[in-house]
Amino acid sequence: MKRVLLAALAAVLLAVPAVQAQKLNKEAIQAKLSKSDADIADAKKSAKAATWLNRGKVYYEAASAPVKDVFVSMEEMMLKLAVGEPAAKEEVTIMGVPYEAWKYPYCTVYMNGGKVATFTAENVFPGAVETAIEAYKKAYELDPKQAEKVKAGLKSVSDFCIQWGETASKAGRQVEAADAFELAYAAQSSPAYGEPDGMCLSNAGLLRTMDGPTNPASFVRGAELLNRALATGYTDEEGNIYYYLYHCYYGQKNNDPAMVQKAKEALMTGLEKFPKNERIMEGLIALYTTEDSVGDPQELVAMVDRSLAENPQSVDLWMGRGFLFCKLENYDESIASFKKVIELKPEDFDGYMKLGTVYAFKGDALQHAMNAEQFTSQSAYDNALAAVNDVYREALPFLEKAYELNPKDVNTLQLLKSIYFRLRDEEGMMDKFNLYNPLWKAAAGME
């Protein structure tokens, strides 16, 4: 019976003609907003929490009205039923991703694969979100006993702003997205709501960082937002917030050379807390190798070694040291560091993978030097080639172990098949290539 009912419901839905235009009654919504404005102008009504709760509700509804019936992953048929036929359609590309843009009077929906991928909306009632937040906070101020209702209202506003930030970001509107995440945090910043989530500020700062190269003012705003996020005690799991802060400071160096030092300080703080973060290490190495005022790269080595002297059992510090020396192209020290990682953590995939990779980098460097050399005899060439192959061969047991620990890692498989192919003239090596090459293709989605 249930299956029959569902089939009947589907038939009814298909039989309903699609609405021809997006419906949004601006006049009716404006009337509610005007009535709320009049209510708070009335001394008696404005003294009641209920007046402000209602104001928060009507202004939130006004803000969300243009996209209240749209959501990501919505099927094409359901979109037409909910919002109507678009006024126009066009093919667009945003940040390298192709979409079909469905244009409605108050929003644009970007379709991909027959589903809603993201959307943007017209700001029909400017300032509605801010007004809703202020209203809910006022309600709590007047009557703390309304905390649950205030929290529910603020959560609706916050959730809407987070969705707005996510969809605007995907649509390439970074500043709009950043402002939306900042509003989400503002909605959460009430005793009635509870603990606000610093991730909203971090997301806003990241989006401003992304906008900085084309809009330098965003670097300034991004730094402010990221520092506010850190002040709340928030850091992402890997510590990338310090890497974004570095970019915000460094992006301001043309106007203020002192920002180079602040960029370094941001990375140093991040490295102290997240020593194996490769982005932070890359940023520091870039600074040390491009900015004379930063100092000698050996200062960075000394800092890591001082930390290791205090905590020699830290896998993270040894990992960071290995990455640092790899970037400095001191492969022997890098190898020694990663060997310490697997000594301390014998089943660590990253340790084995990075150790094998550094051996491969060392082999590449030797091969490059060999290519630039003029050999006077075949035997000299053969000896040099054998020395290079010996280094590549040293990578194999570590990469084999990495494969054992994570058989689906594409990079491990690619290195294994590449090195075995290089050594294919040696006994058993071609068999190994024939084993790993199809595994790599499968993991890379080539089969």
Image (spheres, helix red, strand yellow):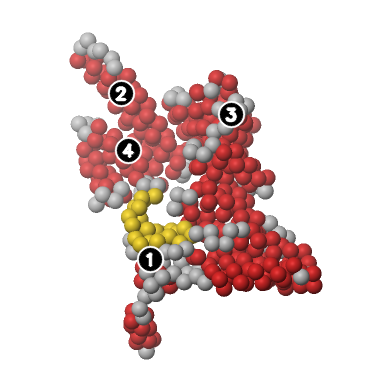
Kindly report the distance in space between the C-alpha atoms of the residues bearing marks 3 and 1. 46 Å
Q: Which mark is residue 255?
A: 3
Which badge, 3 or 4, comes first in the chain's sequence? 3
Residue in the foreground of this view, choosing between 259 and 339: 259
Please tell me how many numbered marks the rendered image carries: 4
Residue drawn at (43%, 72%) of the image = 82
Tag 3–tag 1 contact (CB < 8 Å): no
Task: Name the kind of residue labelled 2 in the image.
Answer: Gln
- Tell which circle, 4 or 1, labels the residue nearer the N-terminal end: 1
Marks 3 and 2, how far apart at CA: 44 Å
Q: Residue at x 35, y 24 (%)?
A: 365
Residue on which disc 2 sits: 367
Secondary structure of the residue carrying tag 3 is loop
First of labels 3, 1 by sequence position: 1
Residue extending furthest toward the top? 376
Q: Nearer the viewer, mark 3 or mark 4?
A: 3
Q: Which circle's residue, 1 or 2, is located before the other in the chain?
A: 1
- Viewed as shown, does residue 220 lie left or right of 431? right
Left or right, 221 with respect to 145, comes to: left
N-terminal of the pair, mark 3 or mark 2, is 3
